[in-house]
Image (spheres, rainbow, N blue to C red):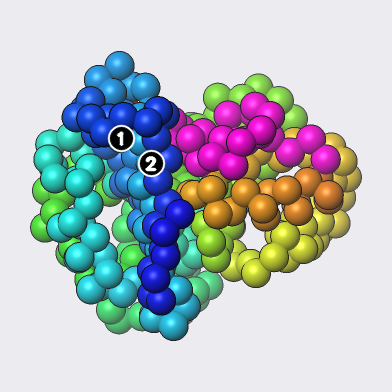
Amino acid sequence: MTANNNTFEQVYNVQEDDNLSSGVALVICVLVQRGMVVAGFSITKELLTIHYTGYNKTKPVWDLDFFEHLLSQEPLLAVREKVKGVFICTDKNLVVPDALYEEKDAKSWLRHIHFVEAKETIEIFPLEEDKARYMHAVPVHITELMKINFKKVPVLPLALYQFRHTRQQSLYLQCCLTNEQVCATLCNYSQLLWHRVFDYTCAEDIAFEIKHLCMQNNISPSKITMMCNTVSAAEYGILNDLSQYFPGIKSGNGRTMSDNWDASTSLAYQLLECVS
């Protein structure tokens, strides 16, 4: 990891090879409110490298200068045709069943639940397996920046991978941790029970939110299978702390975590599946 007064960077490579990036054929990009992740894969979908860059809280969220500079300087994004998907994490979201969905009313519901500013735009995505729509509000300048840089690339919610019901098991909670937020979805087999993106400062905040959810729904926390991804290795310590409250916590692909990059590589693979 490298850092200066304003930003910090982390790089994961499958091996020490100066020519590793030359083998990258597929790229995904993830934007969070104070950072960006870029993952490169081979043509056979083998993860080769992850680059993460973030900035500290002295600067505002979604700082345009930061994202513009990074999009122009990140080597993995040099060939835009290699980029297969861009994912954005925002806490202003709402899941609306298709049976209740009316575009005008749905957007009003989102504005009643969250303070959606005039400089934000509401994007809508189908959740076919759940027969619902996923809505989220994104800063207009970020949306426009994505359109300029990725004209033919799908720009999707980070949460989308959590709505792919590939697991036939009861009560599983999928989480993705950024350095400031948790994107969490609770399912029971293929039934969606709960979804939220919320802020945290320590593992105790996450544990409290989950145990409060369990209390509200008469669920024993011990019955929940926890599967957590992270955007970088920096969140691995939070997962370790969280395991005190939820023993047996796994990475997002259901595997045991033994390395501080396991949860990040799991996220990269799951996001690539969403656009493959």
Residue 257 image offset from top left, x and y in percent: 66, 34
Q: Which residue is the site of mark 1?
A: 40
Residue visible at 39% across and 35% down in the picture: 13
| Spatial separation of the CA atoms under disc 1 and disc 2 | 6 Å
Give the quarter of the figure containing the N terminus.
Answer: bottom left
Establish if 188 lies above or below 45. Answer: below
Judging depth in this view, the residue of 241 and 93 nearest the camera is 241
Residue 175 image offset from top left, x and y in percent: 60, 47
Give amino acid for label 1: Gly
The quadrant in which residue 27 appears is top left
Side of 231 where 246 appears, left or right: right
Establish if 67 lies above or below 31. Answer: below
Residue 54 image offset from top left, x and y in percent: 40, 63
Establish if 118 lies above or below 223. Answer: below
Judging depth in this view, the residue of 171 and 130 nearest the camera is 171
- Magenta stretch bounds: 247-273
Please give the label number shown on residue 50.
2
Disc tally is 2
Residue visible at 69% across and 65% down in the picture: 202
Residue visible at 11% across and 58% down in the picture: 148
Establish if 168 lies above or below 198. Answer: above
Judging depth in this view, the residue of 229 and 232 nearest the camera is 232
Residue visible at 37% across and 31% down in the picture: 16
Q: Does the magenta segment cover residue 260?
A: yes
Q: CB of mark 1 within 8 Å of CB of mark 2?
A: yes
Crowd rating for badge 2 (residues with CA inside 10 Å; few <14, some 14–19, many 20+) = many
Give amino acid for label 2: Ile
Judging depth in this view, the residue of 226 and 218 nearest the camera is 226
Q: Secondary structure at mark 1?
A: strand
The quadrant in which residue 268 appears is top left
Disc nearer the start of the sequence (1/2): 1
